[in-house]
Image: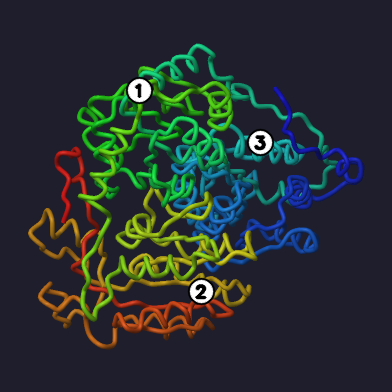
Amino acid sequence: MSKPSASTKHRSEIHAIRPALGADVVVQSLVNHGVDLIFSYPGGSVIPLHQALTRFHNQIRVVLPRHEQGGGFAAQGYARSTGKVGVCTATSGPGAANLLTPVADAKLDSVPMVIITGQVGTKMIGTDAFQELPATEVFRSVTKHHTLITDPNDISRVMKEAFYIANTGRKGPVLVDIPKDILTATITPDYDAEICLPGFIHPVPKPSKKDIYALLEAIRGAKRPVICAGGGVAAADAAAELRSFVKKTGIPVAMTLPALGVFPYEDPLSLNLLGMHGSVYANHAVHECDLLISLGCRFVDRITGNVQKFAPHAQLAHVDIDLSEINKVCTASISILGDIKEVLTEINRKVLPPETSLEPWIQSIREWRKTDPLAYESMGEDIAPQHAISMLDNLTREYDPIIATGVGQHQMWTAQFFKFSSPRRWLSSCGMGTMGFGLPAGMGAKLANPDKMVIVVDGDGSSLMNIQEMATCFCEKIPVKVMLLNNQHLGMVVQWEDRFFSSNRGHTYLGPIDNPEATGKGTGIGPEIRYPDFVQIAKGFGWQGRSIRYQNELESGLKEMIDADGPYILDVAVPYQEHVMPMIPAGGSFNDIIRK
């Protein structure tokens, strides 16, 4: 078993000979792995850990979220925007349980995290003690690895293993559950202890030369090839290698939701978003292609729809770091197991463009783009949500901002109309689709990137899920900006109600029950004063804010938000009847696409 690349010897020479409390060993292990920021909520089982953190206050900044879930998503925002391991902690029982959602979210989106939870004392485990939760069992299926420490002498080794697993191979969350008496035990730590991970496969095998050759031959013979770039490209920091590959071959690129930004939105060979709410031309190209080169794509249902009708004419080449993803959903005729950055580097040394000119194929795509562009209709004096996002993009282009979103219609409109050109600028819950992701993720991203503008595009439903983190932003002086697209409805569910349930409202209206909007017979904008009043709520948390209702207020409102010094919310009233288009119904195919 190879050792982690991060060296800790110079630190261990200083600390290994000194007895220390288990909690201090935990914190020193974090320092040894370069951690300078954690999101941590105290409680009975982790009081010793928080006491230790006060002793290391010059080395690690502790940010106190107002809910453990907020801390988990903030750690994700830190990790997604930097590629580093995000760290969060919580106490036992309900504290640990509140981390379940962000941990499950990180697992599906392959986000590297180390989660430390407190546990009742070792002698109390299994007795249904106060605030006891069998965390390793609860988190078993939503973590990449999980450990309950029962010997304080194992702390430094287990912490080393946690960081190693979280950030190698296919990245993901690792849980370390620590009983209170382990934190208070006195030990002589060994920070150079060898990791012990029987059965853990690493490094990832080098890609087979035979499989590389097969892909090179397939590219040479293709007449209608398409690249499907998935989240694996972003996770592997392989955007530069992808762009070189495209430059050498001239093959157009479609992107899955987590991959946005790995290839420039406005590049002529960009097909932009693929899948249920992707562009018509991206889905059309995949439907007609004869070679589909998948790079780190999981082929989830939101991409494929009806698997039997997905890319029906294509030979599939699938490159992935995780063997379990290859042939899991779509059968590949060429499969390459390996790190995408390494695979693309190797391919770029040898690849030649297709023998047959791709110009007829590219021209067909141009025609599809012209016929079915990503577009929207003006709403007169009302604000079209797509227009708000397009204007936000135009006004912030010079800042190259990081954009975090909640989940719902606003998420899809941002994916469609914000023109991402760089990786790690798009932060969104893609696999799990977790409402409440946006604000805390943006908070974590801003702390990790203090010199970058961070904007959260949120919906009123998603915003309410973790609105308490406004307090964190104010108290910790985190100048996050929020553009809230407020339609007083659970917009994406409303869209499905309209399309598939005869517009019958099944508890998807979020405003006052005596409002005509509750029956679906209103104007779509709602009353002059909306409830809840997000600006007043934000001001109560120490934020600045403004509500706007009409299109002629949009530009000035956005500029005010952009120029604000501290945290700011712009509450933008938008009609609830607007749908995210195009749309491929669940289980459908390209032939079933709904254009408007």
User: As displayed, is residue 514 above or below residue 450?
Assistant: below
- Point out residue 466 in the picture as x, y percentages from the top left corner: 44, 66
The structure residue drawn at horizontal position 38% and vertical position 43%, both measured from the top left corner, is: 256
Total numbered circles: 3
Q: Which callout, 3 or 2, points at the residue further toward the start of the chain? A: 3
Q: Which callout, 2 or 1, points at the residue further toward the start of the chain? A: 1
Q: Which residue is mark 3?
A: 164
Disc 2 element:
helix
The structure residue drawn at horizontal position 59% and vertical position 48%, both measured from the top left corner, is: 115
User: As displayed, is residue 57 above or below residue 196?
Assistant: below
- Point out residue 152 in the picture as x, y percentages from the top left corner: 74, 41
Which quarter shows the N terminus?
A: top right
Disc 3 residue type (three-letter): Tyr
Q: Nearer the viewer, mark 2 or mark 1?
A: 1
Q: Which residue is mark 1?
A: 356
Q: Quadrant of residue 286?
A: top left
User: As displayed, is residue 335 above or below residue 591?
Assistant: above
Q: Which residue is mark 2?
A: 470
The structure residue drawn at horizontal position 23% and vertical position 81%, both measured from the top left corner, is: 381
| Residue 432, label in figure | none
Which quarter shows the C terminus?
A: bottom left
- Binning the other alpha carbons within 10 Å of mark 2 as few (below 14), some (14 to 19) or many (20 upward) gives many
- Point out residue 243 in the picture as x, y percentages from the top left corner: 51, 39
Which residue is more in the foreground, 401 or 306? Answer: 401
**Res 512 visible:** yes
User: As displayed, is residue 105 above or below residue 342?
Assistant: below
Disc 2 residue type (three-letter): Met
Disc 1 residue type (three-letter): Thr
Q: Estimate the spatial distance between the alpha carbons at disc 3 and disc 2, rounded to whole Å.
A: 33 Å
Disc 1 element:
loop
Disc 3 element:
helix
